[in-house]
Amino acid sequence: MSEYITMIENMDVSDLRQISETTFYDTFEGEYSDDDFNQFFKESYNEKVLLNELNNPNSFHYFYKVNDQIAGYLKLNVGNAQTEPKGVDYLEIQRIYFYKTYQGGGRGQKFIQLALDKAKELNKNKVWLGVWEHNQQALSFYKKHGFEVTGQHEFITGEVVDIDLIMEREV
């Protein structure tokens, strides 16, 4: 089985939109109404928004592929692309998702390592991310990889305001 990570390019925007919507829905199915999902997808995952993100020099996007099939994706931010004003010493993991059939097997760990390597390359001291306070699987995963809760912020899906825990770790 061939597994590798590749940069996402503008020509991949429809694939990025598809995996973004599918994995977000699969992760949070039952937590939001269809209207809330649809509003969130329209605001966050339409191709114009995604192209703007892909063209932001302070954001980095990657696909994880298994046998040339997209299995997951990762979005990293630095500088003013971060969703919170963390400053120049930080790199944010904004999105890390896999299709359900590809979860496990150390793939998420490879994305975490990529984020840490990118942080080192860019001379960042810390990596941070936001995790929904009720997503125990994700919280356990990040704690296992050295992240600690340092705060919280709001995350809006449609009309629903949730609390994300902010987690950080040294590079």
Image: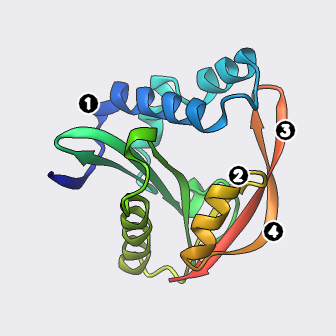
Q: Tell me if 14 is positioned left or right of 158 in this view.
A: left
Identify the residue position indicated by label 2 in the image.
135
Task: Check disc 4: other Cα within 10 Å, few if <14, some if 14-19, many if 20+.
Answer: few
Could you tell me how far apart the alpha carbons at marks 1 and 3 are, in whole angstroms? Answer: 33 Å
The amino acid on which the numbered mark 2 sits, given as a three-letter code, is: Asn
Closer to us: mark 2 or mark 4? 2
Identify the residue position indicated by label 3 in the image.
161
| Residue located 42% across and 67% down the image | 109
Please provide percent x and percent y for residue 40: 67, 27
Image quadrant in which you'd find residue 131: bottom right
Identify the residue position indicated by label 1 in the image.
11
| Residue located 56% across and 63% down the image | 92
Q: Earlier in the sequence, mark 2 or mark 4?
A: 2
Please provide percent x and percent y for residue 153: 80, 55
Q: Earlier in the sequence, mark 2 or mark 1?
A: 1
The answer to whether marks 2 and 1 mark residues whose Cβ atoms lie closer than 8 Å is: no
Q: Report how many numbered discs are placed on residues in the image.
A: 4
| Residue located 59% across and 30% down the image | 25
